[in-house]
Structures are given as structure tokens and as C-alpha cells.
Amino acid sequence: MAYESASKPTFYFIGVTTGKSSIMKVFPRWAEHLGLGDVAMRGVDFIPHDTPERYREMAAFLKSDPLSLGALVTTHKLDLYEACRDQFDEIDLLATMMAETSCLSKRDGKLICHAKDPISSGLSLDGFLPDNHFANTGAEVFSMGAGGSTIALTWHLMQASRGTNRPSRIVVSNRSQPRLDHIRSIHDALDSDIPVEYVLAPTADENDAILATMKPGSLIINATGLGKDAPGSPLSHAAQFPDKGIVWELNYRGDLVFLDQANAQSQERSLQVEDGWTYFIHGWTQVIAEVFNVAIPTSGPGFDEIAAIAAKATGRA
């Protein structure tokens, strides 16, 4: 793929269906609000698990093009890191631990790899979890999909600094074994006392069976990309969510079947149902702050204003 040199400071979005993302409407408003000047955004679409050569070509272009400032990476966090890590001049500690990149920035000609998901996902999750939820309920976590988002979320929840406010059990499922092996290796390095199960679950019925074992109040997460990057849900319509469960759909756009499934049971089972909107805001603002070297609030009136700008730009307000 041939890349055209940027004619103005340019920020890239590396994803699958970038043109459909709300960020295309939101970023110009945020850029004005943050005083970023005359900047552009370009989406770059790859197929999931694209060839290493394509990822390396993008990284080489980004590093060499003077006005290309950096990028946010979504679906390709693990694959891009694996393909391009020798091209990065610096890799931050979290990116090394997670073996992924969600943010590429440049300083003094150096291409720097960052993992921002542990920060942005933690901010999002702690923003809607009831106070001391796991300590008070003994609840568990079931995350479907073993990619970068689940790595980041489980890392955040397993931190010893959370004390007793950690899940009593974590279950991670995935349709292929290599991703499960990868997340297990990261968890092993944490040396946590939380029991974690890694389940190969290529079908929705297998995820349904895991879901049926989760305790009341458990956190159930769709981190598969199904509903956005591909149609459908990791669960069948026969799936039953745990009573008083917290259900988190990491996507905020697309054919959100998983979200519909949770909402259909929300009253009967007293569910707290969350979509990925705040995760979207934290994810983008963490990367924008790094790439443009600006301070962006993560809470309080300043963050609320950022969120309101995004909501107005997308008609969500």
C-alpha cells in the first residue's frame, strides 16, 4: 500500500472500519477545543490479523514522514506490536508487559510504542463499578475475547494495590488457542493469587455454558469485536446473565447484538448494562494527549466538557 506524505500535522487511526467511527466527527471539535491548530486525521484500515509486511510498511511510513505525528491502534494492537517491535526506537513499560501497542508517538524523530489501554480501560471501568464492588459481593469476571482489551482490563483488576476489591475468579474465553496462551503468559508474570481460567470457546454455546457458572454480581465483558468489526455476539440468544450482573459491551457503535441481549434481561435480572462510549473517550484522549503532548483531564468538569463535545458532535447528546 502506498502512503501519501502528510501536508499538515496528521494523526492516524489504525483500525478495521475507521471511516465509520465517531472519531471522524469528534476529532476536529476536540482539536479546536484543545488548541491543536491546523491538524488532520487519517484512517488506515487493515483486515484483522493482517500480514506483518503491511503493519511494517505503516510503521516505516509513520517513522519517516515528518508531518505524520502518531497513531491510535485498535483491533491490531497485538499483531502490530509483534510485527513491528524492532522498528520502535522506544517501548514503554506497559507495552513491554502487555506485548501490544495502542499508541504510536514521535519525539525528536524517534518512533515510540505505548500501551494506553491499561490506563484508559481502568479509568472507564472504575468510573461505573459500584464502590468496592468485588470486595462487597465476591463477584467474578468473564471476558470473552483474549486480545489487547482483555489483557489490559484483567491486568488492571488483578493489581495487588486494589486490595480486597478484586474479582474472586476470572474466566477468559477465546475462539483460538494462541491468544489464550499469550494472555496466560502475561498473567503468570503478575504472580497474582486470583484464579484465572483460560477456555477455548469457538462457539456461542460454549460461552453460554461458561456464563451459566458465574456468580451473582459478576462482570461480563464482550471484548471480541463482534458487533463492530464483525456481525453477531459471542453469546447465543439462550444465554442467561447472572443476577445483579454488570454487563459491559466494549463497542459503542455497530450492530450491538450483545448489548441488546443484556438489555432484554436487564429488568428481570437487575443488570447494570454499559456500552463502550466512555471507554471510547478515555481511549482516544489518552492517545491524543501523548501524541500531541497536551494535558487532558480524566475526570471532573474538564473531562465532562470533553465528553459533552463528543456527544454533541455525534448526536448522542
Image: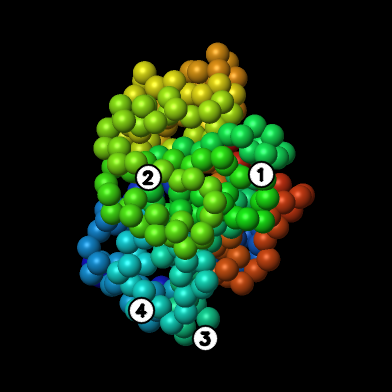
Could you say which is closer to the camera, residue 164 or residue 262?
164
**Is there CB contact under 8 Å for labels 2 and 4?**
no
Residue, x 35% and y 79% (percent of image)?
87
Provide residue 272's location: percent of width, then percent of height.
Answer: 59, 28
**Disc with the residue nearer the chain's start (2 vs 3):** 3
Residue, x 48% and y 18% (percent of image)?
264
Residue farthest bottom in this picture: 108
Disc 4 on helix, strand or loop?
Answer: helix
Provide residue 240's location: percent of width, then percent of height.
Answer: 44, 20
**Is there CB contact under 8 Å for labels 2 and 3?**
no
**Disc with the residue nearer the chain's start (2 vs 1):** 1
Residue for badge 4: 87
**How far apart are the two marked residues, 3 and 1, measured between alpha carbons?**
42 Å
Q: Is residue 86 above or below residue 1?
A: below
Asked if residue 121 shows in the view, the reply is: no
**How far apart are the two marked residues, 3 and 4, measured between alpha carbons?**
15 Å
Label 1: few (<14), some (14–19) or many (≥20) C-alpha neighbours in 10 Å: many
Asked if residue 268 shows in the view, the reply is: yes
Amino acid under disc 1: Asn
Residue for badge 3: 108
Disc 3 on helix, strand or loop?
Answer: loop
Could you say which is closer to the camera, residue 282 or residue 150?
150
